[in-house]
Amino acid sequence: MRNHFVEGLVDPAASVGPQAERAPKASPRSWAKEALFFFYLYCGWVQLRDAVRSLLGRSRVTVLYYHRIGERDVLTRSIDDFRSDIEYLKQNYDCMSLREFSERLTANKPFRRRAVVVTFDDGYRDNFTEAAPVLTQAGVPATFFVATGFIETEREFPHDLRAQRYDSLSDDPESCFPKLRWDDLRAMQSSGFEIGSHTVNHTNLGTADRQTVTLELHDSLTALNEHLGEAPRPFSFPWGKPEDINQFAIDEARRAGYYAAVSAYGGANSRDTDRFRIRRVDVGNGHLTGLAVRARIAGFDPEYFRIKRAGLEN
């Protein structure tokens, strides 16, 4: 992938706004969690499971998602941690694009090796200034899902506004997380990264009326194609939990012309996965240690277990 990420950029640190102190990653009970993650990863069971799946051509594909890269808050993965994540993925997994994964699902091809797909949600500018250079250097493909109504604006995402109510940053006039620009997205796409839709307004399609669902899906795709050129594009459900997704929205995403859709829960995927119900695993939380991320990628996903126990899975 060609590198377009140094031309015309301001200082990357300035591009993500004022830096806040990160929350400590260690706590007294974290030692027990780390021991559990270590045991899960290295007791031999994961290796045996993966070997059997490989022989059967049924290795799993884990689609990962991040939001921000920097040092701003506990939901932002630090650049050092992100670089470590990508190095680990490169050494231990097949790193494929979402497009390739979708095509293999369509063809029902066997998966002989465990694989991962890297994705980002929302459209923060640090995706361009911080994440993209790391991915380019490592040769790892990625898909960036953007809410088109936030591009080149100072609008705040609903989850950021909610977080600011409980954060001293709420009184800071520079607390807005900068958003991607269309020029950024063009450079990213030219470098081989995929740009997908995350609606126009980061709308919860599980609760929106049908007209809104249709408009959010169609208008976002239209904006992407007008600014970036016609291309097959995937869709990411905002919020993305079981209650935020329904069959009408899935069917409408197909009709709109997307080639796949991803959630924000559910763990790993198999060759039987529906292209419009692709599961993902959250690894972008700033509190997660390296071992915790590796355990989630290998299948130890607390969010999936919670949803499974509650009977919320679609």
Image: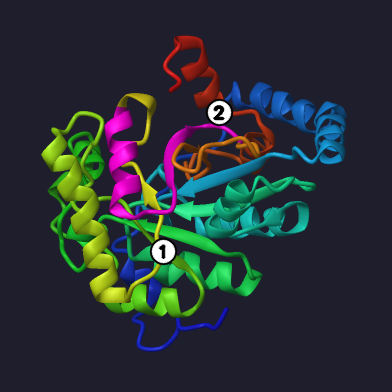
Question: Which residue is rendered at x = 57% and y = 34% of the image?
Answer: 26
Considering depth in this image, is 272 or 98 the residue closer to the camera? 272
- The answer to which quarter of the image holds residue 183 is bottom left
The magenta span reads 244-268
Whether the magenta-drawn stretch holds residue 131 is answered as no
Other-residue count near label 1 (Cα within 10 Å), few / some / many at <14 / 14–19 / ≥20: some
Question: Which residue is rendered at x = 63% and y = 52% of the image?
Answer: 104
Residue labelled with disc 2: 27
Residue labelled with disc 1: 232
Q: Kindly state the secondary structure of the residue where label 2 is placed.
A: loop
In this picture, residue 153 sits left or right of residue 180: left
Say if residue 175 shows up in the picture.
no
Disc 2 versus disc 1: nearer the observer: 1
- The answer to which quarter of the image holds residue 181 is bottom left
Rendering coords of residue 279 (x, y %): 51, 37
Rendering coords of residue 109 (x, y %): 70, 48
Say if residue 122 shows up in the picture.
yes
Rendering coords of residue 86 (x, y %): 63, 58
Determine contact: label 2, label 1, CB under 8 Å: no
In this picture, residue 294 sits left or right of residue 282: right
Give the residue at the far bottom of this rendering. Answer: 7
Q: Which amino acid type is marked by label 1?
A: Pro
Considering depth in this image, is 105 or 227 the residue closer to the camera? 105
Q: Kindly state the secondary structure of the residue where label 1 is placed.
A: loop
Above or below for 9 versus 168: below
In this picture, residue 231 sits left or right of residue 214: right
